[in-house]
């Protein structure tokens, strides 16, 4: 039978748990990066203050969050 010291068993257990957490973190991070995409129709540029903002509604006219002016998508 293989004898193992208590401190070695604890350290191996901790290394195993930390490596599993690291693997899951890297795997889920890659999935998040793949899912993120921004359609150019949601990017708006204010004609007054030149602020660039995102509006996910499919409106033809939006209000700039910085200066409050109305902007029309062309």
Image (cartoon, rainbow, N blue to C red):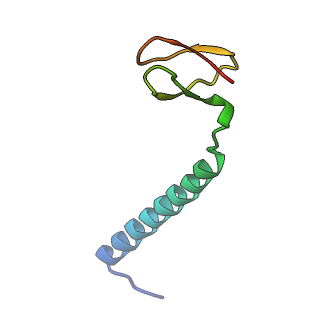
Nearer to the camera, 74 or 19: 74
In the image, residue 61 above or below residue 52: above
- The residue that appears at 45% across and 68% down in the rendered structure is 16
Q: Is residue 3 left or right of residue 6?
A: right
- The residue that appears at 41% across and 68% down in the rendered structure is 13
Rendered location of residue 12, percent (x, y)? 40, 73
Q: Quadrant of residue 5?
A: bottom left
Rendered location of residue 53, percent (x, y)? 51, 28
Rendered location of residue 54, percent (x, y)? 55, 28
In the image, residue 29 above or below residue 48: below
Nearer to the camera, 48 or 4: 48
Mark count = 0
- Please state, as top left, top right, bottom left or bottom right, where the C terminus lies in the image: top right
Nearer to the camera, 18 or 1: 18
- Residue farthest along the left direction in this orientation: 7
Q: Is residue 34 left or right of residue 46?
A: right
- The residue that appears at 59% across and 23% down in the rendered structure is 55
Q: Is residue 46 left or right of residue 43?
A: left
Q: Is residue 3 left or right of residue 24?
A: left
- The residue that appears at 64% across and 13% down in the rendered structure is 61
Q: Quadrant of residue 15?
A: bottom left
- Residue farthest along the front direction in this orientation: 48
Rendered location of residue 7, percent (x, y)? 29, 74
Q: Quadrant of residue 6?
A: bottom left
């Amino acid at each position: 039978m293989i004898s193992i010291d208590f401190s070695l068993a604890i350290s191996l257990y901790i290394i195993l748990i930390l490596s599993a957490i690291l693997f899951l973190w890297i795997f889920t991070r890659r999935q998040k990066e793949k899912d993120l995409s921004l359609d150019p129709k949601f990017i708006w540029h204010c004609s007054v203050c030149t602020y660039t903002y995102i509006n996910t509604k499919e409106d033809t006219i939006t209000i700039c969050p910085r200066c409050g002016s109305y902007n029309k998508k062309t």
